[in-house]
């Protein structure tokens, strides 16, 4: 019985002691009128960029996916169409973006916020097909700069009683491990409630993003 407790204690101390690994990237946006800023991280998957900006206390994660139409890893400056986060690269979305001849690709936005600790309840927002756009600038050195606004469809999630009961100390330790990873690396770790022991609630709303911008240097 002592081993899980000491492991939990160690993780808790670690999460309090270490700051996020620094980088030169920057992201800022107003979420429902409240400022949110943190150095984002990025990962490239072929013709997709994944941008993730995360903080803790409470856990917050803003993620942006950007994809081009060339099916390669070369991104162009220009306008990207923001689409449905659950069904982004459908034939309809791609055809619409290509037919209008003014978009370089598509983008998706997802926001997750912990509303009750430790990761007991969440507020989740996802972009939709609302004809919203993101402006992307690609510098010669590979640096990406973007501006965006959007209205996300919001939903609420609550941890299932069975997940809490049967998960026990192990589930709690897992949550603390994920929090520590996010705090030290800047990457989100297992924050999505869907399919992870949470139930979607009946309540829904809108999450408004305004004045969004980020800068990602090629070396970070």
Image: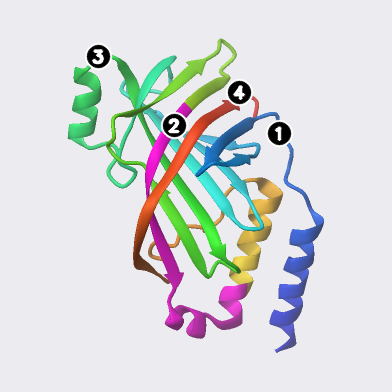
Labelled disc at residue 149: 2
Left or right side of 90 for 107: right
The disc, 3 or 2, on the residue closer to the chain's N-terminal end is: 3
The disc, 1 or 4, on the residue closer to the chain's N-terminal end is: 1
Closer to the camera, 76 or 103?
103
**Residue hosting label 3:** 101
**Residue hosting label 4:** 218
The residue sitting at the right extreme is 17
**Residue hosting label 1:** 23
- CA distance separating discs 1 and 4: 11 Å
Labelled disc at residue 86: none
Is disc 3 surrounded by few (<14), some (14 to 19) or many (20+) residues within 10 Å? few
- CA distance separating discs 1 and 2: 24 Å
Residue 168 lies within the magenta run: yes
The disc, 4 or 3, on the residue closer to the chain's N-terminal end is: 3
Please give the range of residues in magenta.
148-172
Q: Say which of marks 4 and 3 sits in front.
A: 3
Q: x and y percent of residue 212 in the render?
A: 52, 31
- CA distance separating discs 4 and 2: 24 Å
- CA distance separating discs 3 and 1: 36 Å
From the viewer's perspective, is residue 6 above or below residue 193? below
Is disc 1 surrounded by few (<14), some (14 to 19) or many (20+) residues within 10 Å? some
The disc, 4 or 2, on the residue closer to the chain's N-terminal end is: 2
From the viewer's perspective, is residue 34 above or below residue 130? below
What residue lies at 71% left-to-right and 74% top-to-bottom? 8
The disc, 1 or 2, on the residue closer to the chain's N-terminal end is: 1
Query: How many numbered marks appear?
Result: 4
**Marks 4,2: beta carbons within 8 A:** no
Q: x and y percent of residue 52 in the render?
A: 54, 41
The residue sitting at the front extreme is 33
């Amino acid at each position: 019985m002592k081993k899980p407790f000491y492991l939990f204690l160690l993780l808790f101390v670690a999460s309090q002691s270490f700051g996020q690994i620094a980088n030169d990237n920057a992201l800022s946006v107003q979420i429902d009128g409240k400022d949110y800023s943190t150095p984002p991280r990025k990962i490239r998957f072929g013709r997709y960029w994944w941008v993730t900006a995360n903080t803790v206390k409470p856990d917050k994660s803003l993620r942006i996916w950007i994809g081009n139409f060339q099916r390669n890893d070369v991104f162009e400056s220009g306008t990207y169409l923001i689409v449905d986060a659950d069904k982004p690269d459908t034939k309809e979305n791609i055809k619409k973006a290509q037919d209008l001849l003014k978009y370089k690709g598509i983008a998706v936005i997802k926001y997750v916020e912990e509303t009750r600790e430790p990761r007991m309840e969440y507020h989740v927002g996802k972009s939709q097909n609302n004809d919203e756009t993101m402006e992307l600038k690609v510098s010669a050195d590979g640096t990406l700069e973007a501006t965006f606004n959007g209205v996300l469809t919001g939903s609420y999630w609550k941890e299932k009683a069975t997940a809490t009961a049967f998960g026990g100390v192990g589930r709690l330790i897992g949550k603390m491990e994920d929090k520590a990873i996010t705090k030290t690396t800047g990457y989100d770790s297992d924050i999505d409630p869907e399919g992870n022991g949470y139930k979607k609630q009946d309540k829904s709303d809108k999450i408004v993003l305004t004045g969004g911008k980020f800068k990602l240097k090629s070396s970070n």
